[in-house]
């Protein structure tokens, strides 16, 4: 006593009780006459036992070389166990994958087989198989309500089953739907027939009806190519400008609206080679020779009037 590792000055100088202790400290009979601890009560250096009480201020004794060796061996054992577990897990995963591959191979070898009736087994098309092309025109989901719904006949391979067929006594009403170029909007020409056919209401209902309900034929006129320069055209309104007129080729197709049956297809040359009275001009300042009204009517007359 004092215990091994006790701080300097412990116990206090002067022994027990410490100087200035109150009267009665330590209690009467608190310590043996020969001092504390009694002689021979504890073996030297054995109290308190290392790690027994852990009183504040008493640092644990340093580890012995033997303890450090035991700790190192324990750590090595733990690492070895972790490595063995990892190897076992890897082997298990490999064996599982090998079994899956074997089962798949046996499944393929057992083909062909018969599935139960009604079994929902998906049909998969090989990725390199050709995509089937459309087998024909597609019926519109609803009747045409506007004359421009018939643009679908020209551009979307669509027909309108509710439309009247080209049958019975002539005339067979037609609409002329024109597209000036790939990026242009298709539009109806409502006046192309006036010089050749007349201006009566019956003529309008035959050559340019406003309601799609009575239309039997859709005439699609598309500009398909451009040729050489014809001339320059000057305009003063809204401001002075000059545009260039070029030759052009066109394609005329006539379909039966009710079935999308192609009744006529022919190539036409733009025969209007004079500068038009008015024209829409793009940024390229180019315009193209159009198919004249007379050629349009002449090309359609047999289908409409017979």
Image: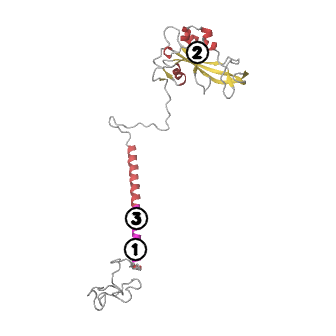
- For the point 41% across and 61% down, which residue is it? 86
Is 218 inside the magenta-drawn segment? no
Foreground of the two, 82 or 58: 58
Q: Give me the C-alpha separation between circle 2 and circle 3.
A: 88 Å
In the image: residue 129, left or right of residue 277: left
Q: Mark 3 points at which residue?
A: 82
Residue 151: x and y, percent?
A: 54, 22
Taking depth in this image into account, of 58 and 195 the one nearest to the observer is 58
The residue tagged 1 is 71
Which of the marked residues, 2 or 3, is nearer the chain's N terminus?
3
Q: Which residue is depicted at the point 57% across and 7% down? A: 200
Q: In which quarter of the image is the N terminus?
A: bottom left
Q: Which numbered dot is residue 190?
A: 2
> Tag 1's secondary structure?
helix
Instruction: Tell me: 137 left or right of 29.
Output: right
Single out the mark in the foreground, 1 or 3. Answer: 1
Where, by quadrant of the figure, is residue 240 drawn? top right
Dominant secondary structure (helix, strand or loop) of the stretch shown in magenta: helix
């Amino acid at each position: 006593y004092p215990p091994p590792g006790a701080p300097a000055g412990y116990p206090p100088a002067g022994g027990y009780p410490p100087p200035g202790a109150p009267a009665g400290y330590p209690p009467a009979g608190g310590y043996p006459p020969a001092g504390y601890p009694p002689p021979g009560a504890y073996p030297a250096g054995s109290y308190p036992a290392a790690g027994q009480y852990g009183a504040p201020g008493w640092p644990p004794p340093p580890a012995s070389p033997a303890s450090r060796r035991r700790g190192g061996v324990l750590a090595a054992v733990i690492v070895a166990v972790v490595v063995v577990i990892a190897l076992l897990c890897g082997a298990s995963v490999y064996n599982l994958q090998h079994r899956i591959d074997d089962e798949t191979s046996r499944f393929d070898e057992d083909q062909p087989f018969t599935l139960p009736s009604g079994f929902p087994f998906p049909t998969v098309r090989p990725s390199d198989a050709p995509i089937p092309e459309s087998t024909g025109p597609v019926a519109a989901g609803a009747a045409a309500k506007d004359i421009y719904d018939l643009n679908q006949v020209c551009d979307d391979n669509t027909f309108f089953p509710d439309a009247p067929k080209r049958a019975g006594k002539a005339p067979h009403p037609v609409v002329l739907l024109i597209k000036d170029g790939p990026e242009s909007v298709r539009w109806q020409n409502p006046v192309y027939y006036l010089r050749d056919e007349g201006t009566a209401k019956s003529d309008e209902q035959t050559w340019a009806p406003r309601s799609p309900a009575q239309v039997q034929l859709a005439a699609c006129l598309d500009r398909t190519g451009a040729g050489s320069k014809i001339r320059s055209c000057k305009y003063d309104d809204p401001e002075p400008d000059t545009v260039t007129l070029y030759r052009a080729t066109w394609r005329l197709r006539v379909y039966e609206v009710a079935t999308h049956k192609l009744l006529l297809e022919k190539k036409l040359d733009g025969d209007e080679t004079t500068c038009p009275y008015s024209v829409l001009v793009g940024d390229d300042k180019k315009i193209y020779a159009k198919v004249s009204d007379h050629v349009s009517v002449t090309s359609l007359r047999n289908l409409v009037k017979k």
